[in-house]
Amino acid sequence: MSDVTNLKVTGMTCNHCIARAKKALESVSGVDSVEVTLEPGAAKVTGSVAHDALIAAVKEAGYEAEAV
């Protein structure tokens, strides 16, 4: 069974940012699906993966993230 992780993502300003953050999250092993929204700056990740790995992927893409 997959878990759902909600992240607050800051630093995104456009649709390109959404695509970049989504691609970074999808690259994490164990992720099944990703939804990223510009407003309010959020990501919903489904899969069996540690929060730290997701946050690290978002930071590597150039944005800030925290689990909510």
Image: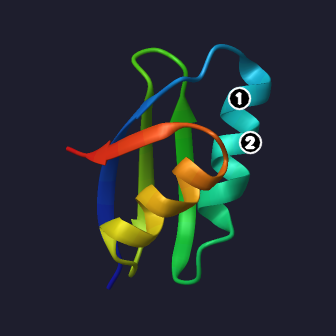
Query: Residue 1: x and y, percent?
Result: 32, 85
Identify the residue shown where x is 40% and y is 78%.
49
Identify the residue shown where x is 62% and y is 54%.
60
* Up-down relation of residue 39 to residue 21 (above or below): above
- Cβ atoms at labels 2 and 1 below 8 Å apart: yes
Q: Which residue is mark 2?
A: 20
* Up-down relation of residue 61 to residue 17 (above or below): below
Q: What kind of element bears circle 1?
A: helix
Rendering quarter of residue 9: top left
Q: What kind of element bears circle 2?
A: helix
Local crowd at mark 2 within 10 Å, few (<14), some, or many (≥20)? some
Using the image as rendered, state which of residue 16 and residue 58 is in the foreground. 58
In the image, farthest residue toward the left: 68
Q: Which residue is mark 1?
A: 17
Relative to 22, is 45 on the left or the right?
left
What amino acid is labelled 2 in the image?
A: Arg
* Up-down relation of residue 37 to residue 35 (above or below): above
In the image, farthest residue toward the right: 16
What amino acid is labelled 1 in the image?
A: Cys
Q: CA distance from mark 2 to mark 1?
A: 5 Å
Relative to 60, is 65 on the left or the right?
left
Local crowd at mark 1 within 10 Å, few (<14), some, or many (≥20)? some
Using the image as rendered, state which of residue 58 and residue 68 is in the foreground. 58
